[in-house]
Image (cartoon, rainbow, N blue to C red):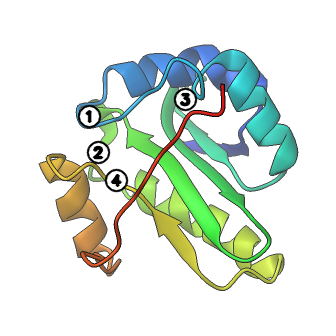
């Protein structure tokens, strides 16, 4: 019923549409552009995945990469009509397996504090919330 594949830039148009309609998904014009996502996928081969339905419609994503020390997941999303079927769990498992294969033993992700659905999901999966870490951002442009 579902097909899981490594994410390629050919999935971008459907992925960005999923991300744009996913409540709580933080998007950035610069880093979520086609060019930026293409570069991310090229720097992190074999770590990001999509889920397609029987009609080849993209219904789930996970972007994953690493800095050589820690893994990072972004844009874990599943179309609301397909939630509750372990799609996100499967996508996450694929990415974590590839991180372990690369010798990366820890992975982080960011969830907006007002994203109730996301926060509940990650807590239910056993991920630990790290309240004592602050995130600082700066544009290099």
- Binning the other alpha carbons within 10 Å of mark 1 as few (below 14), some (14 to 19) or many (20 upward) gives few
SS at mark 2 in the image: loop
- The image shows residue 37 at horizontal and vertical percentages of 69, 30
- Binning the other alpha carbons within 10 Å of mark 4 as few (below 14), some (14 to 19) or many (20 upward) gives few
- Mark 4, residue position: 85
The CA distance from mark 4 to mark 3 is 14 Å
Image label count? 4
Q: Are marks 3 and 1 in contact (CB under 8 Å)?
A: no
The CA distance from mark 1 to mark 4 is 11 Å
- Mark 1, residue position: 80
Q: Which mark is residue 54?
A: 3
The CA distance from mark 2 to mark 3 is 15 Å
Q: Which mark is residue 140?
A: none
Q: Where on the picture, by quarter, is residue 25?
A: top left
- Mark 2, residue position: 83
Q: Are marks 1 and 4 in contact (CB under 8 Å)?
A: no
Q: Is residue 126 left or right of residue 44?
A: left
Name the quadrant of the C terminus: top right
């Amino acid at each position: 019923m579902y097909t899981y594949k490594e994410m390629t830039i050919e999935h971008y148009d459907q992925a960005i549409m999923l991300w744009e309609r996913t409540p709580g998904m933080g998007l950035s014009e610069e880093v979520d552009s086609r060019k930026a996502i293409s570069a991310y996928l090229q720097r992190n081969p074999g770590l990001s995945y999509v889920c397609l339905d029987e009609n080849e419609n993209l219904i789930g994503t996970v972007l994953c990469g690493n800095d050589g020390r820690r893994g990072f997941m972004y844009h874990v999303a599943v179309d609301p009509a397909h939630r509750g079927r372990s799609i996100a769990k499967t996508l996450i498992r694929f990415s974590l397996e590839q991180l372990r294969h690369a010798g990366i033993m820890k992975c982080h992700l960011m969830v907006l504090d007002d994203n109730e659905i996301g926060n509940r999901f990650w807590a239910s999966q056993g991920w630990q919330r790290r309240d004592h870490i602050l995130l600082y951002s700066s544009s290099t442009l």
